[in-house]
Image (spheres, rainbow, N blue to C red):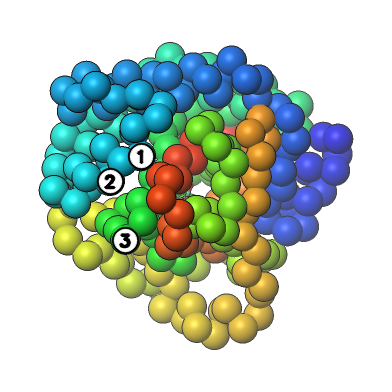
Amino acid sequence: MNKKVKYKYFNDGYAIIKNFLSYSDLKACRDQMIKSYKKILNKDINYQNIDEILKSHEEKKDWDKMYSAFNHARNSKAFKKISKKLMILGKEIFDIKLKSITTGYAIGIKSSNRTSYLWHQEKSYYSNLNTIHYHFPFMRPLNKKCGTMSFLKKSHVMGHIKNLYNKQKHSKSVYSFVPKDIKEIKKNFSEKFLNIQMGDVCVFHENIIHRSNANKSNKIRFAGIVRQQVV
Ligand SMILES: O=C(O)CCC(=O)C(=O)O
Ligand SMILES: [Fe+2]
């Protein structure tokens, strides 16, 4: 299993580790996230209404509060526990010692691209470090309909791309370091959408080119993120 993951990671730039996280690990992240939004948005939020409520806050441009709630959730024990497990796994797969950089999650809301990333390499954000990145569902599976991230398969072979432009729509949007030659680059690699089930984890290379996609569903896309540094 680990050998296959390692091979795919180096060959394709990403790999999926099946059934790695337990139901209770994922539930802890989900419950914590709901709690954080409930506390900071000061609304009676639960598993059933979270999608609708966050969508309305997004539309009302209540972005600062949403960001505080996000920070509250992502720095919690629930996410840190997953990071620890992935650190042990990283050691087993790659035989390297890892240290956590950050934990968090990506969020994708229908009709909003404020939180969606254009094509980029993670290396652009952590250019002085050797890093490894994990992405996992913790609310529901991730697929094309909900705007799951996609990869340009094998594009990590290009190494660290330095000819970039920095794109940010406005001060409350995420910003992406997009390769200037992205149109040409896209002709050479195929786009693969990350289809991933609960419990599975995707590990990806710092140089693989990836992006977020538009969410066509009424449910919010929540995708857990763990970033680690080789020490
Ligand atoms: O899922 C997304 O929206 C983007 C995720 C991403 O860029 C990342 O995890 O590095
Ligand atoms: Fe990214």
Q: CA distance from mark 3 to mark 2?
A: 9 Å
Q: Secondary structure at mark 2?
A: helix
Task: Locate residue 201: give its quadrant.
Answer: top right
Residue at disc 2, CB closer than 8 Å to ligand 1: no
The residue identified by callout 2 is: 55
Q: Amino acid at mark 2?
A: Lys
* Quadrant of image for the N terminus: top right
Give the quarter of the figure containing the C terminus: top right
Answer with mark 3 or mark 1, whichever residue precedes in sequence: 1
Where's residue 170, x and y in %? 17, 61
Q: Residue at x 14, y 42 (%)?
A: 62
Crowd around label 3: few <14 · some 14–19 · many ≥20 (10 Å)? some
Residue at image coords 21%, 31%: 68
Labels 1 & 2 near each other (Cβ < 8 A):
yes
- In the picture, measured across the screen, residue 85 lies left or right of residue 39, that is right
Q: Earlier in the sequence, mark 3 or mark 2?
A: 2
**Residue 111, disc:** 3
Picture layout, residue 141 above or below residue 149:
above
Amino acid type at image mark 3: Ser
Q: What amino acid type should be assigned to the residue bearing mark 1? A: Asp
The residues bearing labels 1 and 2 have C-alpha atoms spaced at a distance of 6 Å
- Mark yes or no: residue 92 visible: yes
Return the mark for residue 92: none
Secondary structure beneath disc 1?
Answer: helix
Residue at mark 3 to residue at mark 1: CA–CA distance: 13 Å
- Residue 84 seen in the current view: no
Going by the image, does 148 lie left or right of 205? left
Q: Nearer the viewer, residue 56 or 184?
A: 56
| Front one among 98 and 221 | 221
The residue that mark 1 highlights is: 51
Q: Residue at x 67, y 73 (%)?
A: 190
